[in-house]
Image: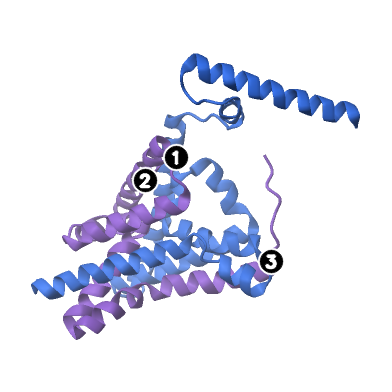
Amino acid sequence: MDKKTEASNLSVKEIQEKSKIKSYKNDVKKTLYMDYVFEQSPKSSHWKNMFWAFLIGGLICSIGQVIIDLFVQGGVETKQASMYTSCILVAVAACATGLGIYDKLGRFAGAGSTIPITGFSNAVVAPAIEFKSEGMIYGLAAKMFNVAGPVVVNGVFVSTIIALIYLIFGV
Amino acid sequence: MMWLNILKAFLMGGFICLLGQILINLTHLTNGKILVTFLIAGAILQAFNLYQPLIDTFGAGASVPISGFGCSLVNGAVEGARAEGVFGAIKGGLEACAPGIATAIIFGYVNALIFSPRTKKK
């Protein structure tokens, strides 16, 4: 125990000293901690990220297109079909989040899994599951809109303002 | 014909997600900020009636990304404003998006009841 505490004390001192030296040398407030963060954070090339985002995002949208086409073939109007399709995608993504599949997908797909409507669904479901332990009301129900809340708030605000501008200028 | 639709949806959807990934790579924005940014971008494009043509051409490629959500919010609000004035403008946006949000809430609740949190593996 004593050795451990000593070691940790030493390392803290070392870190402080080194960070002082570094900031002095580079004239930038770059601490050793930031170096450590950059070392530890996974390095993935931008090109690879972009490729996966394009592929997965495109795949999710083409699945959506298949569902829309099936609805249209079944005699549903295109506008309605696209609404039903987003509901189905949201439902599927919610279940995939619960099963832990969507999380794995998001690790390499990045924006490809965030930007489609499925990412919105994931943003609702993931915190709901995560904060279940904090209770049904202040945990599950409150944290459900942790990320999705800002989306809805901003969306409603902006769209109402735009509609009011249309109304005022009589477009 | 169906395959062409799917290809168009793939290309446009991929392109929008690619833009998002470039934005993440350059600025390290978090998921929530990316979602809000694209939602507002879609809403503002639709304010100038620029996003609906994309949906008409590329189908799900433009309507499935969150910017399509913003577009349908604006469409709903503007249609409401034309039909019922100020109260229509307030009502219309959420009305248009209610199915998606309600589905997310219902399935989110059910899934949260069924599943317990997983420990994140590295």
- State the image quarter where residue B28 is shown: top left
Q: Give the amino acid at mark 1.
A: His
* Closer to viewer: mark 2 or mark 3: 3
- Tell me how far mark 1 sits from mark 2, CA to CA: 20 Å
Q: Nearer the viewer, residue B58 or A9?
A: A9
Judging by colour alone, the chain drawn in blue in this rendered image is: A
Instruction: Name the residue rendered at 26%, 71% in the picture.
Output: A160
The chain holding disc 2 is B
Residue furthest right in the image: A1
Chain the render paints purple? B
Q: Outermost residue, top direction?
A: A25
Callout 2–callout 3 Cβ contact below 8 Å:
no
Please tell me which residue is depicted at 42% across the width and 30% down the height of the picture.
Answer: A47
The circle on residue B73 is: none
Figure label count: 3
Whether discs 1 and 2 lie on one chain: the answer is yes
Pointers 1 and 2 in contact (C-beta within 8 Å): no
Please tell me how crowded label 2 is: few (under 14), some (14-19), or many (20+) other residues with Cα within 10 Å.
many
Q: Amino acid at mark 2?
A: Gly
The quadrant where residue B60 appears: bottom left
Q: Residues within 10 Å of mark 3 (few under 14, many from 20)?
A: few
Q: Image height check: is A27 above or below A81?
A: above
Q: The disc labelled 3 sits on which kind of residue?
A: Glu
* x, y percent for residue A19: 59, 22
Asked if one can make out residue B51 in the rendered structure from this viewpoint, the answer is no
Question: Is A149 in front, or is A103?
Answer: A149
Q: For the N terminus of chain A, which image quadrant?
A: top right
- Label drawn at residue A134: 3
Q: Residue at x 59, y 58 (%)?
A: A97
Residue under label 1:
B28
Residue ID for mark 2: B14
